[in-house]
Image: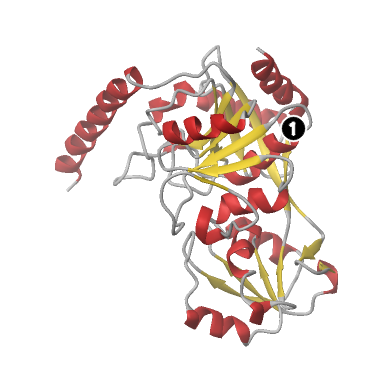
Amino acid sequence: MLFPIMPIYYFVTWSRNKLYDLGIKKSVSYGFPVICVGNLSTGGTGKTPMIEYLIHLLKADYKVATLSRGYKRKTKGFQLADKNATAETIGDEPFQFYSKFRNEILVAVDANRCDGIQSLLHENPEVILLDDAYQHRKVKAGFNILLTTYNNPYFNDLVLPTGNLREPKGGAIRANIIMVTKCPNDLSDNEKSKYIKRIHPEKHQHVFFSSIAYSDSLCSAEETKAIDKLESFTLVTGIANSKPLVDFLRSENLNFEHLNFKDHHDFTEEDISTLEKKELIVTTEKDFMRLKQYESLKGKLFYLPITVIIDEASKMNQLIKDFVNS
C-alpha cells in the first residue's frame, strides 16, 4: 500500500507549497512591530506560555496587544476583551491572557487577522502579538517565532493526513527564532548542538531551547495549596498533550486519577455533574478558565501554574527587543 500513497503525499506537498507561494504574494506587511508565535504541527507545542513570556518581556515598555483566533468561542468577528469577557466570548487561551494581564495589555480575537489588526489600530497598540498565526497567509509578521517540541520535532514529521504538519516542513524558513520546547531539564550542550544540526538553521535564524517549570503550589480564585500536602485528587485535562504534566505529577509521587479530554473540550452538564462528585480537582490554567464559571466547583477546583525557562534567554530577549525598537 505504500507505493500508491507516497505519490499522493508528494503531490499534496507540492500543491501546498504552490498555494503558499501564491498566498505570500498577497500578504500584508505593517509599519509597526507584529510578532507571530506559531508552529508547523497541529498543536501542543507551548504557544500560550510563549505568548505570556513575550507579554512579560514587553508590557513595561510598550502598549502590547494580543490577537488570537478565539478557537471554539461562541461569538463571531472582532472582539476586544473587557470586564464582560469569558472563555465563551473570546476563547479559553485569550481569556487566560486577559485574566492574568487585565489592566496591562489589550486582548482581542478575530478569525481574520488582517481585520483584527485593523480593528486593534483604533486602540493604538505599539506591539501586536499574533497567537497561532504562522499559517495565516494574509498577514506577513515582521518577526516569526516557530515552536517545535523536543520529542516530536517538525523535521521528523509529514504533512497531514500522513503526519501532523499543517504545512510542509520547508515553511520553517520563515522563522526568525526556532524554539525547541518541552526539553528535558538536563539537556546537555552536546545534545543541543546535535539537535541544531538536525534543524539546520539558515543564517537569519536562531535556535533556542526551553523547558517547563511547574509551580510547587496549586492556585484557585480564592487560595493556594502546596503540592506536597496533597493526599489524592482528580486531574482534569483538555489540552493537546497532557503527558508532561502527568509525568511531573507522577514524579512527585502523588496519588491521582486522570480524566483526559480532547483539546479545547466543551465541558457538558454530564461532565460537570461528574466533577461535582470529586473532592479535589487539579487542572491546567487553560482548562481552569473554562471551568471556573461553575459555582458548584468552587472550593475544589485548582490549577497548576507553569513558567517557561529559556536557555540563553537574555540573547533571545535582545533579539526581540531589537526588532521592536527597529
- Say which residue label 1 marks: 57
- In what element is the residue under mark 1? helix
> Which residue is drawn at the image coordinates 62% and 51% (left, top)?
82
Outermost residue, front side: 122
> Which residue is drawn at the image coordinates 66% and 19% (left, top)?
324
Horizontally, is 22 left or right of 7 in the view?
right
Query: How many numbered circles are shown?
Result: 1
Q: Callout 1: few (<14), some (14-19), or many (20+) C-alpha neighbours within 10 Å?
A: some
Image quadrant holding the C terminus, namely top right
> Would residue 64 be visible to someone looking at this image?
yes
Horizontal and vertical percent position of residue 240: 50, 55
Q: What colouring style does the render use?
A: secondary structure
> Which residue is drawn at the image coordinates 45% and 21% (left, top)?
173
> Would residue 146 be visible to someone looking at this image?
no
Outermost residue, bottom side: 277
Horizontal and vertical percent position of residue 99: 68, 54
Horizontal and vertical percent position of residue 293: 62, 70
Which image quadrant is residue 220 in? bottom right
User: Closest to the observer: 252 or 98?
Assistant: 98
Horizontal and vertical percent position of residue 52: 67, 42
Horizontally, is 158 left or right of 63 in the view?
left
Task: Decide: is 189 above or below 88.
Answer: above
Which image quadrant is residue 280 in? bottom right
Which image quadrant is residue 159 in? top left
User: Closest to the observer: 194 or 324?
Assistant: 324
Amino acid type at circle 1 is Leu
User: Closest to the observer: 324 or 43?
Assistant: 324
Task: Decide: is 21 above or below 106.
Answer: above
> Which residue is drawn at the image coordinates 63% and 29% (left, top)?
125
